[in-house]
Image: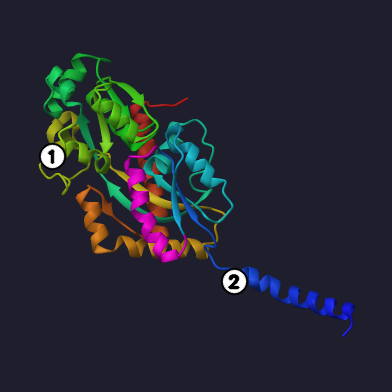
């Protein structure tokens, strides 16, 4: 066979198998990234690191967690929204996907159009915590005490948060709005650094996610007053809800958080579906559910459609809270 003829046959063979080969290329073909849009040490980070090893076992590729903090989660979310590599995911929150669009005049991403919801990972209550020394200084041992001191001393108390637009921030804004009090807001680049400053006595209080605050509460480094959910938490059943402890002024108060895995809209539907199956299977593991529950988180693992519906309903809910509180970020 001539050299020219052999080249023609090889070319035809390549053309015939190339599209099929590309279509059947294994996925994932390299390590996956889960972007956490906050600093290490917070609940978003803890949950991402809890599911990463499970995904790694299921998918056969390393799963790396990367922290990209800034702008209330907007910087990390925007990076994932623009990703087209097929191997980048986001651990999104109620802040990045329900609150921020009401709080910020312009977002660098569209929470709906730029993402494909994979599954809700967990829901958690927030917990109202104070620096113990600062609480003693002001004579605060209950939610009612906090309301009294905050009303009598406008601007004297300050509250830390994991960033503008986070559920931690809005839990505080809702508290201020309902009680007619004023406290200074100090936003950080994540719950981890905010907790460090709170324990150091550089701030007075914080409405932190329960999983990240719980170890410090148990160690006596933080004074917990109440949880922000509608019901008490099984992880700390001795703590009342803010509504229970706050009297008439805080009737109906509720400000829980949630965390979920999202893919950029560019990721093919079959890959999103596979991620949903594997994460949901992991979250159904009794050992993982129990570990999350002991930290104050309720494991989920719902369908992508259910997660999308939650995002839509939470967006409407928090838009009303932001408007009522008057909170804005330039």
- Nearer the observer: mark 2 or 1; the answer is 2
Above or below for 261 versus 1: above
* Quadrant of res 325: top left
Magenta-colored stretch includes residue 40: yes
Q: What secondary structure is found at the residue carrying circle 2?
A: loop
Q: Quadrant of residue 93?
A: top left
* Rendered position, 317 above or below 156: below
The residue under label 1 is 239
* Of pointers 2 and 1, the one earlier in the residue sequence: 2
Residue drawn at 59 percent across, 52 percent down: 84
Element assignment for label 1: loop
Residue 150 on image: x %, y %: 21, 19
User: 231 and 198: which one is in front?
Assistant: 198
Q: Position of residue 55 (x, y in %)?
A: 40, 60
Cα–Cα gap, marks 2 and 1: 54 Å
Residue under pointer 2: 24
Tell me if mark 1 has few (under 14), some (14-19) or many (20+) residues whose alpha carbon lies within 10 angstroms of its own.
some
Q: Residue at x 70, y 71 (%)?
A: 18
Q: 309 above or below 319?
A: below
The image quarter containing residue 8 is bottom right
Q: Indicate the position of residue 167 as horizontal and vertical percent values.
A: 33, 37
Q: Residues in magenta?
A: 39-61
Residue 303 seen: no
- Say whether marks 2 and 1 touch (CB < 8 Å): no
């Amino acid at each position: 066979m001539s050299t020219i003829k052999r080249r023609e046959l090889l070319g035809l063979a390549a053309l015939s198998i190339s599209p099929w080969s590309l279509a059947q290329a294994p996925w994932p073909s390299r390590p996956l990234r889960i972007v956490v849009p906050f600093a290490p040490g917070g609940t978003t980070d803890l949950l991402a690191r809890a599911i990463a090893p499970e995904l790694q076992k299921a998918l056969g590729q390393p799963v790396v967690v990367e922290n990209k903090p800034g702008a209330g989660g907007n910087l990390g979310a925007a990076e994932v929204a623009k990703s087209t590599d097929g191997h980048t995911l986001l651990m999104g929150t109620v802040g990045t996907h329900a609150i921020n669009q009401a709080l910020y005049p312009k977002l660098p991403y569209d929470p709906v159009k730029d993402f494909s919801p994979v599954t809700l990972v967990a829901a958690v209550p927030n917990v109202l915590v104070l620096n113990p020394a600062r609480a003693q200084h002001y004579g605060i041992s209950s939610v009612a005490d906090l309301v009294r001191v905050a009303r009598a001393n406008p601007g004297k108390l300050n509250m830390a948060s994991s960033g503008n637009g986070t559920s931690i921030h809005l839990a505080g804004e809702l508290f201020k709005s309902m009680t007619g009090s004023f406290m200074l807001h100090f936003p950080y680049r994540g719950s981890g650094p905010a907790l460090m400053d709170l324990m150091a006595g550089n701030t007075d209080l914080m409405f932190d996610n329960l999983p990240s605050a719980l170890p410090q509460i148990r160690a006596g480094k933080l004074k917990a007053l109440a949880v922000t959910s509608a019901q008490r938490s099984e992880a700390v059943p001795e703590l009342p809800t803010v509504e229970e402890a706050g009297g008439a002024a805080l009737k109906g108060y509720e400000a829980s958080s949630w965390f979920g895995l999202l893919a950029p809209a560019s990721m093919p539907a079959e890959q999103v579906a596979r991620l949903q199956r594997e994460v949901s299977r992991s979250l159904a593991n009794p050992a993982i559910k129990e570990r999350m529950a002991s930290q104050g988180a309720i494991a989920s693992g719902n369908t992508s459609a259910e997660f999308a519906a939650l995002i839509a309903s939470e967006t409407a809910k928090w838009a009303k809270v932001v408007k009522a509180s008057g909170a804005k970020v330039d």
